[in-house]
Image: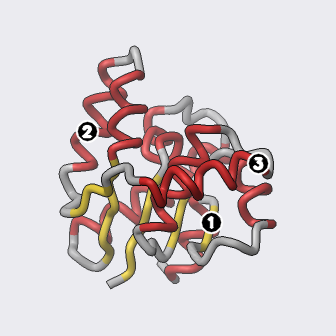
């Protein structure tokens, strides 16, 4: 079964302002992926770093939304030295610390796909040759999964 790591911004996309076409399209893509997860066709990865970032979110509605989605996951990846080490390598190539932890977690968990709405992270991560996990936008993920 394919495994998916949705970062915090992609998990929150359905709660963003839907007046922009891009946001609406990405929301629909995320909802389609979540439907496949609910139907047992894809596996969602959860992590300690996702939980940490969620609990730092001051908006309770967003916290509850993401926490509810993460109940679909049966796998919680715990922070470990290998993730920390890879995270430092990712930071050294310009990826922000929390983003680096998310990416490193997905990579160490051998996720098939890492999904983000963050354009800067997407551009930088897609240029890296040290990751086996495919880093995609929600629309690219939808296309890759042929949904």
Image spot of residue 135 (x, y percent): 62, 66
The foreground one among 113 and 89 is: 89
Q: Nearer the viewer, mark 3 or mark 1?
A: 3
Please name the residue shown 25% across and 39% down the image.
67
- Where 14 falls versus 2 (above or below)? above
Secondary element at image label 2: helix
Please name the residue shown 50% across and 60% down the image.
29
Q: Which quadrant would the N terminus be assigned to in this image?
A: bottom left
The part of the image, by quadrant, that contains residue 58 is top left
Q: Which mark is residue 92?
A: 3
Please name the residue shown 26% across and 49% down the image.
70
CA distance for labels 3 and 2: 31 Å
Q: Nearer the viewer, mark 3 or mark 2?
A: 3
Task: Answer with mark 1 or mark 2, whichever residue precedes in sequence.
Answer: 2
Q: Is residue 72 left or right of residue 12?
A: left
Task: Answer with mark 3 or mark 2, whichever residue precedes in sequence.
Answer: 2
The foreground one among 36 and 126 is: 126
Please name the residue shown 51% across and 67% down the image.
107
Secondary element at image label 1: strand
CA distance for labels 1 and 2: 23 Å
Task: Answer with mark 3 or mark 1, whichever residue precedes in sequence.
Answer: 3
- Where 14 falls versus 31 (above or below)? above
Return the residue at label 2: 67
Image spot of residue 12 (x, y percent): 45, 38
Return the residue at label 1: 135
């Amino acid at each position: 079964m394919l495994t998916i790591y949705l970062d915090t911004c992609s998990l929150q996309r359905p709660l963003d302002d839907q007046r922009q076409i891009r946001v609406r399209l990405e929301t629909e893509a995320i909802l389609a992926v979540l439907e496949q997860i609910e139907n047992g066709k894809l596996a969602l990865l959860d992590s300690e770093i996702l939980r940490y970032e969620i609990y730092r979110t001051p908006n309770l509605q967003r916290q509850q939304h993401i926490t509810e989605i993460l109940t679909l996951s049966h796998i919680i990846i715990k922070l470990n030295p290998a993730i920390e080490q890879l995270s430092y390598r990712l930071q050294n190539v310009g990826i922000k610390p929390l983003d680096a932890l998310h990416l490193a977690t997905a990579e160490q968990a051998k996720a098939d796909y890492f999904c983000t709405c963050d354009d800067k992270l997407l551009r930088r991560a897609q240029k890296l040759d040290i990751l086996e996990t495919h880093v995609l936008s929600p629309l690219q993920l939808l296309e890759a999964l042929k949904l």
